Image (cartoon, rainbow, N blue to C red):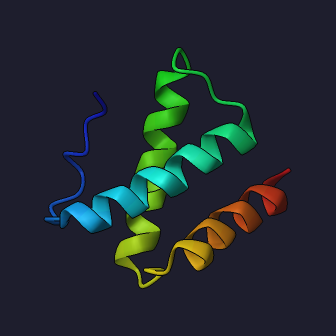
Amino acid sequence: MMAFTKHSGIFTPIELELLWRVFDQLCNERRLALKDGDQREQLACEVIEAFQNGFTAEAELWQSLSKRRSARA
């Protein structure tokens, strides 16, 4: 289980499902396996941060982080 102690927000079950779907899609896109714990935790923090910064629709949340990845590559 990943530690989200850096984030103090309380999420509803629906929000958690959305965050998980986006996280899972991005893990697949970036080919992060379960063994890539540090990278997965960093990605989880990015997903939560983007959500808390207003990217609350699933498509826009995914696109915001997917574009960020492309810009870094």
Instruction: Name the foreground residue: 31 vs 73.
Output: 31
Q: Residue at x 68, y 71 (%)?
A: 63
Identify the residue at the far top of this view: 35
Q: Residue at x 48, y 27 (%)?
A: 38
Total count of labels: 0
Q: Residue at x 55, y 33 (%)?
A: 39
Q: Residue at x 62, y 40 (%)?
A: 27
Picture quadrant where residue 24 is located: top right
Q: Measured along the vertical axis of the image, is residue 42 above or below residue 8? A: above
Residue 66 rendering spot, x and y as whole percentages: 71, 61
Q: Quadrant of the N terminus?
A: top left
Q: Is residue 7 left or right of residue 39?
A: left
Q: Measured along the vertical axis of the image, is residue 51 above or below residue 40? A: below
Residue 2 rendering spot, x and y as whole percentages: 31, 33
Picture quadrant where residue 70 is located: bottom right
Q: Measured along the vertical axis of the image, is residue 2 above or below residue 9? A: above
Residue 68 rendering spot, x and y as whole percentages: 71, 64
Residue 46 rendering spot, x and y as whole percentages: 48, 57
Q: Is residue 54 left or right of residue 28?
A: left
Q: Is residue 60 left or right of residue 69?
A: left
Picture quadrant where residue 18 is located: bottom left
